[in-house]
Image: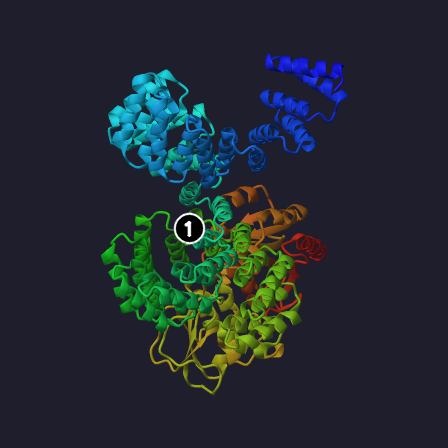
Amino acid sequence: MNDPANTLLNRALDLHQAGNLSDAESLYLKFLDFIPDHPDAWHLLGVIYLQIKEYMKSVDSIQRAVAIKPDFADAYFNLGLALGNLGRFNEAIHSYQKSASINPNRAETHFNMGVALSELADFEKAIACYKMALTLNPEYAKASLNLGVALNASNQHEEAIMHYRKVLSTEKTSIDAYNNLGLSLSYLKRFDEASLCYQQALSIFPDHPHLLDQLGRTYQMLKRYDEALACYSKAISLLPNHAEAYFNQANTLRKLKRLEDAATSYLKAISIFPEFWRAHYQLGKLLASQARYEEAVIHFQKTLSTNPTHIQAHHHLASCLLQLKRFEDLVTCYQQLLTIQPENADTYSNLGNVFSELKQYEKAIEVYEKSISIQGDFAEAYYNLGIALYALGKFNKAIHCYEKALAIRPQFPEAQNNLGNAYNALKDFGNAVVHYKKALFLKSDYIETFNNLGNTQTALEQYGDAAFSYQQALKLDPNNAEAHNNLGTLHASTEKYDQAIVCYLQAITIQPDYAEAHYNLGSIYYKQERYADAYESYERAITYQPDHERAHNNLGATLSKMRRFDEAISWYQKSLILNPNHAETYDNLGGALCEIFRFDEALIAYHKGLAINPKDYKILSSLATTYNSLKQYDKALEHCELALAIQPDYIDCQWNRSLFNLSLGNFESGWKGYEQRWLSKNADTSITSCPYPIWLGESDISGKHLLIQYEQGFGDAIQMARYIRPLIEQGINCWVQMISPLTKIMRRSFPEAHIIDKEETPKNIDYRTPLMSLPLTMKSFSEADIPKITPYLSIDTSLAYHWGSQLPAKKILVGVVWRGNPEHKNDHNRSIKLNELLPIFTSNPHIQFISLQKSLTEDELVTLRGFRNVLMLDDELTDFDETAAIMSNLNLLICIDSAPAHLAGALGIPLWLLLCFGGEWRWMADRNDSPWYPSANLIRQTGIGDWTNVMLTINERLSDMAATI
């Protein structure tokens, strides 16, 4: 080495030894510029970096040194120190091993190798290193201390105690030795000795907060809680940010049941050390024990953010999330737990339960099967797998799983119960009953099974047995809401609706949020046509169970009955979001859309329903009705035939087909099919019960007594009265039931007949014929067969003369009727708002309009009083006789499809009949005349729900009339 370089190195060494590290570093670097392959200089530069904690630079420098000089023991030793400080313990161990292989007699090398091995939790090898260090230097106190720690970590506490005592024999003031000795004694539950150890240490260091904290922990283990708290208090007073002391204080306070104080201490520890996971964990457990689950979750999550592999923290977090029904978060929790314990069957089973709660049954099945693959005899997993399969409608597979569970654990009443449920779902009620009874044999107080058994017995119509089962459930628990609900359903099955209501209300009183009971109550109210009550019940069911698809559907049906179709449509659509595969809901949705003339959307709904169930004859029938409304008559009949091919005895479709045929003039098939009205729920008809046989024209009954039975409405009675005279002419003695407003005019019109009250049943009658069966009876199978003698009703001439004197003279008199009976199911289509009629009055001031509208509203009265050419006779229309007398003085009646139109037609008075789009069957399809009433002229809507063209036509014709009269 040349002298300048040597001088430079010596100056660097002097500065290094003097602690002037910065200048020393500069000179080492300068020296290395001269001699770059000098191992000592690189080593010493690395030592400086080690001293100033620039460990990466230290590693780089010392690695250069050993690259130049491979047998450089000290360099390897210091390289190990630098790597250890970087947490690169495996590399550090390798460096110490290289150093020891060159110089095996350096105790510090073995000691530091033990430190690195301890960091890797390889305590067995660490112990060997510390023992080697002590062999080389028996007085090496730090090696004895660390050996004790490693022995403790290996559960070799007795040997650890020996080493701690050895340290204290020479270093009587070693706080670490006292502390570790106390810990070892505590590990061995020798708490009295541990407390003496800490007391001895505190006699030397009376104000040592950590020793006070440890003594407090020992007192806690000895259940000397007050002394423990005194120690913690003193420790905290000496060291206010002593998080561990606060933590231990909290643990002791929990033992004393001072939970709020304990929570405060945990929070204090956390405020000092926010990542204190043990404090978060214990606080979480405390909060969970108080059912403060949301708060507990936060602290368990904090625990896991610092210590993500803490198994118990995961389990406690899962328990809280389950209580909170935070199932999505619970999935994440179990999935994280499985990354730590990938072969844990219980965790897979629990995860499956969460997926089942989320109705993600396919995922549930997957993880249950994984659980079973890990633990083949896991009865609970088979049971839960059965539940998921059952939820997907895979009942046979569910049965297999329940049977597997029972094979593993025969005393498993829940599996027997669910096996009954699966057989029940397959409608194998006999097997269901067998397994419910087996479940009850295993668990005689199994209320759920008594309920299930009762439900199955109800399905078997074993109502007495079912009632007994429900009563057994109620005997076990009089406040069992489900049993009250089921008993209500039993009463509903036997049409004891009032008793059913009592049971459902009892169930709701016990459990106000019992959605199914509210739903069932709504269904009874719906059957009783108490639609407002049904609406409230269904709405409550949805409030308490937002995913109750049937309640959504039935609420829609209820609103449809209340004629609130827009709202009904909304509820049907919500129902379909919950269950897009429910064909019946699409049928209901289509029906509501039709009611408000949204036929194209209705067709889409029906076809979606058919895509789900192509054999749904009810939807095919609904399509037929919709096509008929759209005047696509061939398609209407075609879909009737499709429906009836699937369900030949579908009465409502047979009834609808008869109406379609009648509207198309196919009278023979139409009138024959019309007889299905007695069986159809859509036909609004009824007759007074009587004992006489029905006659439909099968034989000659001249000379016999025939009772013609009143049915349906005023207009129907007037229309069919035309058949009374032909019957009389056949020599038949006719008795005609009639509603009182028509009695007077019918008696005058048919004096040979006996016109009686519709509720009256005369004696000595041979046959009966319902009024609307007369066209079939009289074989009106073509238009030519319809009796056309008009007028066939007779007016009271004196009454007509009276009205002639009362009505304005020398004026065109036009009667008007714009509304029908609001109870009529099609009234919303056939009736016209008065405002739409007003242009007729304003455009024709020269015409005197006579309002024959009954029951004028206050608004209508106010409006009509503003028209001088409108005369209101509302109060004068006492019966049809009075109305007929008025009509006989009119030039014309303008009327919607209601009873006055039939009266005008029967009297032969000119009639302009205003029909909605499509119109009723009796007015035929697309005609402007009527085979029933020659004096009628039919004016039809050309657009659905639009009366504009009808009003324009009336105005034009009134102008023409005024010009010709």
Where does the image place residue 320, in percent across and percent down from the top left? 41, 42
- Residue depicted at x 27% and y 52%: 479
Q: Nearer the viewer, residue 853 or 289?
A: 289
**797 to the left or right of 530:** right
**Residue 145 % position (x, y):** 41, 29
Residue 80 seen in render: yes
**Which residue appears at 45% of the width and 34% of the height?**
130
Q: Quadrant of the N terminus?
A: top right
> In this view of the protein, can residue 263 be seen by the observer?
no
Q: Is residue 869 above or below residue 789?
A: above
> Is residue 785 found left or right of 110 in the rendered image?
right
Q: Three-letter amino acid code at disc 1? A: Ala
Q: Which residue is mark 1?
A: 541
Closer to the camera in the image, 430 or 72:
72
Q: Say which quarter of the image contains residue 178.
A: top left
As drawn, the residue found furthest toward the bottom would be: 700
Q: How dense is the environment of label 1, judged by Cα within 10 Å: few (below 14), some, or many (20 and up)?
A: many
Q: Looking at the rendering, which quadrant does residue 291 occupy?
A: top left
* Residue drawn at point x = 46 percent, y = 72 percent: 679
In the image, taking residue 658 as reference, residue 226 lies left or right, namely left
Q: Is residue 465 above or below residue 569?
A: below
Picture quarter with the C terminus? bottom right
